[in-house]
Image: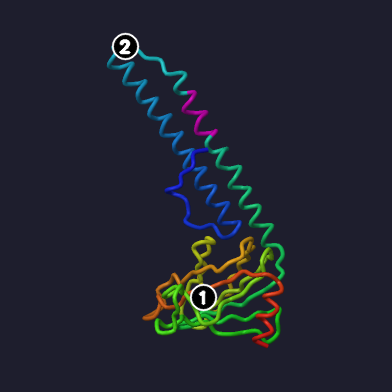
């Protein structure tokens, strides 16, 4: 398979996004094969018409290839796409940690349903509070901590207008709507900090609602959770 590094996602911080990244590269490889096939057929037709000056042309082989080749392409796309859908369905069956995410104008609030009393608001850090190495418009005062190699469930809603909880490196973009709870499940297979933003035009400070998650080990998560209780 051809490696289309220029077209790949910049990051793939979850298993689901990694699978989507691979599937995207796989489809690019199939697209290259289609372009080469069409170019060869076009060149063959021009050669028969202009070089050999044939008045009667037979295209049984070409018709057969034009029927079989698209079928093979569809089968090659169907198998990995169904596998990804099957994986996502299995991942949604169970979760070990739940978090309620509520969008406000203009900040996020988080409530760990499995840890009584663990809830807080998350605001973007102002420029005056940033240190060397911090990310402007992305770092927050309260990070959301989650466990490494654990399926986590996010229940996303809104208290006012429509927001959008988005983390591009994980292929996540889910609208937060008032009166509606959207459920999303993630599996963190990397330890680190992941950034996102509100992707819905929700008002004047729409661009100042960053999302900041940190995947960590169980011991560190326990220490962090006890500091809030």
Relative side of 224 to 161, left or right: right
Residue at the spot x=57%, y=54% of the render? 18
Extreme residue toward the front, this view: 132
In the rendering, at what x and y percent does residue 26 appear?
52, 43
Q: In the rendered structure, are the residues bearing label 1 and label 2 in contact, judged by CB atoms less than 8 Å apart?
A: no
Between discs 1 and 2, the one toward the N terminus? 2
Local secondary structure at mark 2: loop
Local secondary structure at mark 1: loop
In the rendering, at what x and y percent does residue 154 appear?
61, 71
Residue at the spot x=49%, y=69% of the render? 196
Query: Image quarter for residue 90?
Result: bottom right
In the image, is residue 215 part of the stretch drawn in magenta?
A: no
Residue 54 - label: 2
Q: Which residue is mark 1?
A: 177
Query: Image quarter for residue 101?
Result: bottom right
Q: Which residues are magenta?
A: 64-72
């Amino acid at each position: 398979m051809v490696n289309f590094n220029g077209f790949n996602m910049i990051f793939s911080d979850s298993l689901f996004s990694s699978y989507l990244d691979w599937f995207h590269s796989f489809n690019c490889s199939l697209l290259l094969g289609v372009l080469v096939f069409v170019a060869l057929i076009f060149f063959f037709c021009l050669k028969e018409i202009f070089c050999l000056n044939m008045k009667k042309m037979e295209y049984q082989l070409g018709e057969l290839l034009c029927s079989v080749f698209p079928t093979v392409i569809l089968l090659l796309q169907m198998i990995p796409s169904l596998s990804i859908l099957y994986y996502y369905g299995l991942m949604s069956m169970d979760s070990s940690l739940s978090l309620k995410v509520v969008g406000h104008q203009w900040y996020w609030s988080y409530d760990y349903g499995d840890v009584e009393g663990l809830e807080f608001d998350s605001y973007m850090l102002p420029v005056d509070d940033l240190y060397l190495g911090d990310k402007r418009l992305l770092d927050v005062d309260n990070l959301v901590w989650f466990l490494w190699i654990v399926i986590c469930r996010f229940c996303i809603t809104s208290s006012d207008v429509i927001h959008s909880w988005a983390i591009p490196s994980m292929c996540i973009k889910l609208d937060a709507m008032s009166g509606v709870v959207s459920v999303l499940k993630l599996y963190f297979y990397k330890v680190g900090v992941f950034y996102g933003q509100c992707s819905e035009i929700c008002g004047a400070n729409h661009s100042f609602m960053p999302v900041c998650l940190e995947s960590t080990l169980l011991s560190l998560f326990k220490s962090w959770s006890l500091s809030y209780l």
